Image (cartoon, grey):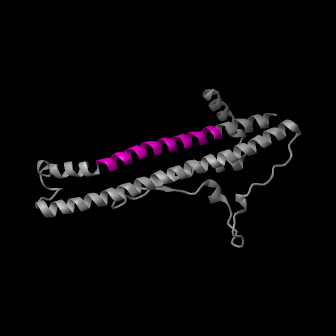
Amino acid sequence: MLRSLVRCAQRAKAHLPTDKKGRWAAPPMFVGHPDPVSNLRPVVYGATEESRAAPSNPTHPYSLAEFSLPSKAGKGARHGLFARHLERLEQRLEAAQLQARLQSFWLDQFNQRFWTDNNVRFQRAVAEYESTSKLVVGKAPLDDVAPFYREWLAVNGVRLRNYNRTLWVSTAHVVASQLLFALLLRYMRCIAWIASEH
């Protein structure tokens, strides 16, 4: 069933109205410079195609493109049925796209916050260890600083395991929401293609 849905979506891609193609295109993502504390390269999310293409009206506080217009009556009951179904699908697709983006944003911020906090704690522990032991962690032989690393992992092991568990679960949620969005988009393209054939 999934294969036939993908084939249908590939044929239907050309039948999706042109204003919808840009609307559902994935916004560009860029990789930023490494954060000096967390050492992570943050993901910089670009604007969606729709928001970049929307003309701005300085006299109007809202974009009129935010509000959908009621659909015009189609040719016959069957066409109207497809149009109503497409409208409902479009609403579900908007919700799925928003959910996928928000979960991705949350996961990126979660990683950034965790590693910033973790590295601050680690540097504080290194400074404390160096002041009491007279060893420089980065330059001393590993055998001499092994007790420090062992203690660090013993003290922070639960927190690191909780992070790993949350990371795995959140990543699965992000993948599932993006998969749902992709499947809904392909299904909508199939329905649009079927509607254009009738």
Image location of residue 10, percent across then percent down: 64, 34
Query: Hey, which residue is sitting farthest bottom in the picture?
Result: 59
Q: Quadrant of residue 86?
A: top right
Measured along the vertical axis of the image, is residue 45 above or below residue 76? below
Please check the rendered image and state whether residue 181 is part of the magenta-colored stretch, yes or no: yes
Q: Quadrant of the C terminus?
A: top right
What residue appears at the point 61 percent right and 37 percent down from the top-left corner? 183
Q: Is residue 197 left or right of residue 179?
A: right
Image location of residue 93, percent across then percent down: 65, 45
Image location of residue 6, percent across then percent down: 62, 32
Q: Quadrant of residue 88?
A: top right
Q: Quadrant of the N terminus?
A: top right
Q: Quadrant of residue 37?
A: bottom left
What residue appears at the point 83 percent right and 38 percent down from the top-left corner? 79
What residue appears at the point 71 percent right and 50 percent down from the top-left corner? 19
Please check the rendered image and state whether residue 38 is part of the magenta-colored stretch, yes or no: no
Report the front residue among 105 and 128: 128
What residue appears at the point 47 percent right and 45 percent down from the top-left corner? 170
- Give the magenta range: 157-184
Magenta stretch, overall SS: helix
